[in-house]
């Protein structure tokens, strides 16, 4: 006698048929025996209630080779994912239920069955929704309307059902559970299945390194006294820090040159030293030029002031001395001597 299982997720439970409520907080599906049922039927209101973990748990209850049928409310829009576009269903764009994006399409329902480890036997078929199924799908999207005992909530639920009716259908996927289990293999020649078992452990042939390791490990206690510390081989001269000495022969004055294809870093080191030397020379030349310019400016200023004072004094002497002082020779001589000394 075949054994059947009906798992319901947010949909009305059929009358006269044994079923389990997978959407109950205390999910009873994982407690059912695994690989036990010949036929399993999943009835879901949307993808949020029967997600990937739920489908995997239900598929695990079916025996290998058994039949699994997925019945879920899906969009009739022929796309891979998502709500129908605004051009096809403009009224749906005003809905803002969090679970609205979890409603799958027919293609996404088929993918979900594959991800659960099942093998679909055909394409997804779409069936019209009954009134109670459509009401259950609308209540799954807006749970507050279903639990609120008020005429306004009932009217809103009816209006929502009429809005969703043209865009929703019952998607049916018939699949089978593969007749193999993890760990089973088969022969490539005879195609006969091979029962899983523990792989035979083949002892590897000992190598020369293993022989040396075994000999060293077995004789470690016997030869422990023969081992010595490598630091004992160094004397006091070896422990002294060696100081690099600059060569003082013909090589002392030879300029180092880098090879054509230098890869040791000497070329970069020499270029850096030449750049530093050139920078120092440029700085010295600039300082020398600045000092010379300053000296020239000071000399020019001094000459300018000297000439200005010299001319001014001679003009003053010509105007004032010849006008107000009598023409006495001795007086002219003393005044000229005094002016020249002052200047």
Image (cartoon, grey):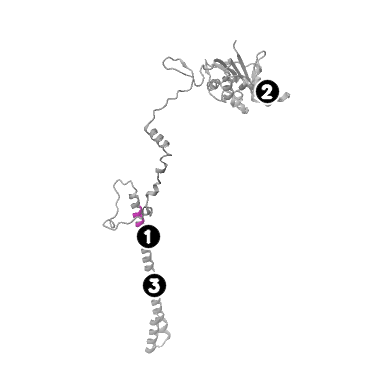
| Marks 3, 2: nearer the viewer | 2
Element at badge 1?
helix
Q: Nearer the viewer, residue 81 or 326?
A: 81
Kindly report the distance in space between the C-alpha atoms of the residues bearing marks 3 and 2.
Answer: 107 Å
Kindly report the distance in space between the C-alpha atoms of the residues bearing marks 1 and 2.
Answer: 89 Å
Q: Which residue is mark 1?
A: 283
Q: Residue furthest top?
A: 1
Residue 244 on the magenta segment: no
Part of the protein shown in magenta? 272-277
The x, y position of residue 241, in whole percent, is 38, 54
Q: Who comes first in sequence, dot 1 or dot 2?
A: 2
Q: Say if 288 sits above or below 137 in the image.
A: below
Q: Nearer the viewer, residue 101 or 44?
A: 44
Q: Which residue is mark 3?
A: 302
Q: Who comes first in sequence, dot 3 or dot 2?
A: 2
The crowding category of the residue bearing disc 2, from other C-alpha atoms within 10 Å (few below 14, some 14 to 19, many at least 20), is: many
The x, y position of residue 22, in whole percent, is 63, 21
Q: Residue at x 41, y 84 (%)?
A: 321
The x, y position of residue 40, in whole percent, is 59, 16
Q: Residue at x 68, y 23 (%)?
A: 157
Element at badge 2?
helix
Residue 276 on the magenta segment: yes
The x, y position of residue 147, in whole percent, is 70, 25
- Side of 88 where 210 appears, left or right: left
Q: Quadrant of the C terminus?
A: bottom left
Q: Which residue is mark 2?
A: 157
Q: Residue furthest right?
A: 150
| Marks 3, 1: nearer the viewer | 1
The crowding category of the residue bearing disc 3, from other C-alpha atoms within 10 Å (few below 14, some 14 to 19, many at least 20), is: few
């Amino acid at each position: 006698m075949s054994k059947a299982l009906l798992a319901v997720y947010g949909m009305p439970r059929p009358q006269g048929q044994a079923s389990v409520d997978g959407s109950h907080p205390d999910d009873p599906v994982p407690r059912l025996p695994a690989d036990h049922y010949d036929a399993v039927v999943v009835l879901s209101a949307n993808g949020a209630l029967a997600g990937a973990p739920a489908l995997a748990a239900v598929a695990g209850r079916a025996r290998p080779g058994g039949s699994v049928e997925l019945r879920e409310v899906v969009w009739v829009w022929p796309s891979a994912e998502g709500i129908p576009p605004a051009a096809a269903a403009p009224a749906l764009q005003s809905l803002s239920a969090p679970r609205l994006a979890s409603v799958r399409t027919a293609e996404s329902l088929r993918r979900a069955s594959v991800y659960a480890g099942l093998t679909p036997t055909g394409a997804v078929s779409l069936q019209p929704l009954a009134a109670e199924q459509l009401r259950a799908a609308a209540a799954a999207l807006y749970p507050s309307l279903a639990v609120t005992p008020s005429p306004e909530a009932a009217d809103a639920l009816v209006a929502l059902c009429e809005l969703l009716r043209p865009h929703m259908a019952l998607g049916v996927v018939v699949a089978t559970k593969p007749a193999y289990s993890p760990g089973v293999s088969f022969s490539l020649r005879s195609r006969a299945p091979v029962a899983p078992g523990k792989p035979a452990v083949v002892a590897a042939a000992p190598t020369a390194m293993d022989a040396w390791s075994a000999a060293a490990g077995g004789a470690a206690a016997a030869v422990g006294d023969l081992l010595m510390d490598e630091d004992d081989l160094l004397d006091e001269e070896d422990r002294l820090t060696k100081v690099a000495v600059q060569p003082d022969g013909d090589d002392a004055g030879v300029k180092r040159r880098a090879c054509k294809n230098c890869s040791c870093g000497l070329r970069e080191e020499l270029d850096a030293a030449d750049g530093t030397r050139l920078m120092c020379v440029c700085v010295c030349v600039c300082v020398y030029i600045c000092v010379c310019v300053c000296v020239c400016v000071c000399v020019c200023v001094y000459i300018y002031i000297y000439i200005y004072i010299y001319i001014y004094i001679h003009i003053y002497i010509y105007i004032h001395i010849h006008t107000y002082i009598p023409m006495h020779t001795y007086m002219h001589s003393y005044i000229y001597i005094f002016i020249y000394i002052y200047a």
